[in-house]
Image: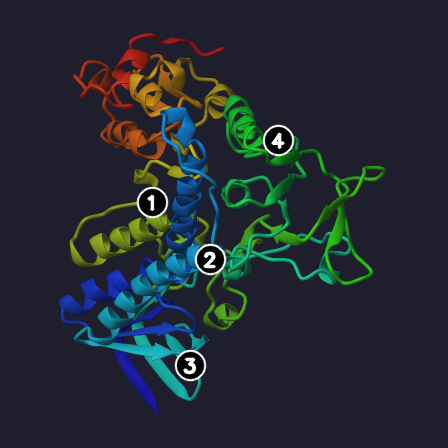
Amino acid sequence: MTTRFDAIIVGAGQAGPPLAGRLTAAGQKVAVIERKLVGGTCVNTGCIPTKTLVASAHVAHAARRGADYGIGTGEVTVDMAKVKARKDEISQGDRHGLESWLEGMDGCTFIRGHARFEGPHTIRVGDQVLEADRIFLNVGGRATAPPIPGLADVDYLTNVGILDLDVVPEHLVIIGGSYIGLEFAQMYRRFGARVTVVERGPRVTAREDEDVSAAIQEILEGEGVDVHVGATGMRVVKHDNGSGFDLYPRDGADPISGSHLLVATGRRPNTDDLGLDVAGIETDERGYVVVDDQLRTTVDGVWAMGDCNGKGAFTHTSYNDFEIVAANLLDDDPRRVSDRVPTYALYVDPPLGRAGLTADEVRKSGRKALVGKRPMTKVGRAVEKGETQGFMKVVVDAETHEILGASILGVGGDEVVQDILDVMTAKLPYTAISRTMHIHPTVSELLPTMLQDLTPLN
């Protein structure tokens, strides 16, 4: 027997539940299918749990620095079981809230199970067959491991497994010097582990400007994290006693002996077991669902949102995907993916807030540009807080005076960059910030000062 719906949403990540809310509020009959955990990566294995751990690590770090502020703290200890319990409580609370919302939503049928297409508008979940004129994919992604010799012989961790640790590793070795790997590196170093990061490329955070990458590495190394770059010939050898391993960065290099191994080298979309070929839905060479500027797939009446469409790998891009789809379908508002300014944050401490293009990308574009840069040591608020690591940098189009991009590495950088993002989205000139009076003492007040002292980008 086939059950008919107005819409079917596959995946209850960050875009699925709010879309179900909008569609049901419009009087539509909606089915939401989830095979695993409601809330997707963000709530269960991404933003919420990891930033909760980052917060605990920050407290431990601040406590150890108490003497710098004239505060005596005594010995600082970390109870990893309690740290994990706090993380679990917050993450599970968010998930249970979403589950309750979906299960109690009028007009919504919540189905647990694995969805597979049997046709362009037909989906099977176990013994149930569902049909709808509109189908929305919100299936997310998962960690992937590179083909490193010997890696399969070791019980390595991904961003999911490491969240189950309730002890501090003796020596955590991390393969991958990008965003996920570096957040865990600093976090576990602050918890008391010895930490080594091994990166195949010539520097960490390769998509950032070189000065940003260098500053991030300096911050981590300043806290005792060992960083190895240029590890082009990695191999892993498990210890004979079954406890621990040796990682060789390249041929002839000394081994790095570790107790725990985290692989943080990339992710892939969860599109390989949905029967997309049966439905005629096209994917690219990496498995991402091909979509247009309004997130429509190659099959009429099917959309793809979130990590599975290759248009962004963040909670905010997923939620914005929902907003774009809902605006087009329900509000007669033709919003597009290309309207948004790329933005994200790296949650090392201090954080990196990013918006738009890097300086390197602007140089390669060939356009004339101006740049402003200020070290955080010149920010009064940062000095008062005793957190002066990093710098802020903004790139401006020399002809239109529109802001092209920004990198804010420093205390509050993830919040300060929002000032710039809003002006970029509004397509206002940089003077919209440079001529605006800002509150003192704040980190943001240095944005006008920096923008009043622009120089040509070489």
Left or right position of 191 against 63: right
Kind of residue sitting beneath label 2: Val
Residue farthest to the bottom?
A: 1
Give how far across and how far down residue 352 sits, in percent.
Answer: 42, 32
In the rendering, which numbered label is found on residue 337?
A: 1
Few, some or many residues within 10 Å of mark 2 (<14, 14–19, 20+): many
What residue is shown with label 3?
Answer: 124
- Give the spatial CA distance, label 2 vs label 1: 15 Å
Which element is circle 1 on?
Answer: helix
What residue is shown with label 2?
Answer: 289
Q: In which quarter of the image is the N terminus?
A: bottom left
Q: In this view, does 135 lie above or below 239?
A: below
Which element is circle 3 on?
Answer: strand
- Give the spatial CA distance, label 3 vs label 2: 19 Å
- Give the spatial CA distance, label 3 vs label 1: 30 Å
Left or right position of 26 against 53: left
Give how far across and how far down residue 390 sits, in percent.
Answer: 44, 23
Kind of residue sitting beneath label 3: Arg
- Give the spatial CA distance, label 1 vs label 4: 30 Å
Of badges 3 and 4, the one in the foreground is 4
Kind of residue sitting beneath label 1: Val
What residue is shown with label 4?
Answer: 203
Look at the image and tell me whether residue 106 can be seen.
yes
Few, some or many residues within 10 Å of mark 4 (<14, 14–19, 20+): some
**Are the residues flagged by discs 2 and 1 in contact, CB closer than 8 Å?**
no
Few, some or many residues within 10 Å of mark 1 (<14, 14–19, 20+): some
Question: Which of the two discs, 2 and 4, labels the residue nearer the N terminus?
Answer: 4
Question: Which of the two discs, 1 and 4, labels the residue nearer the N terminus?
Answer: 4
Kind of residue sitting beneath label 4: Arg
Question: Which of the two discs, 2 and 1, labels the residue nearer the N terminus?
Answer: 2
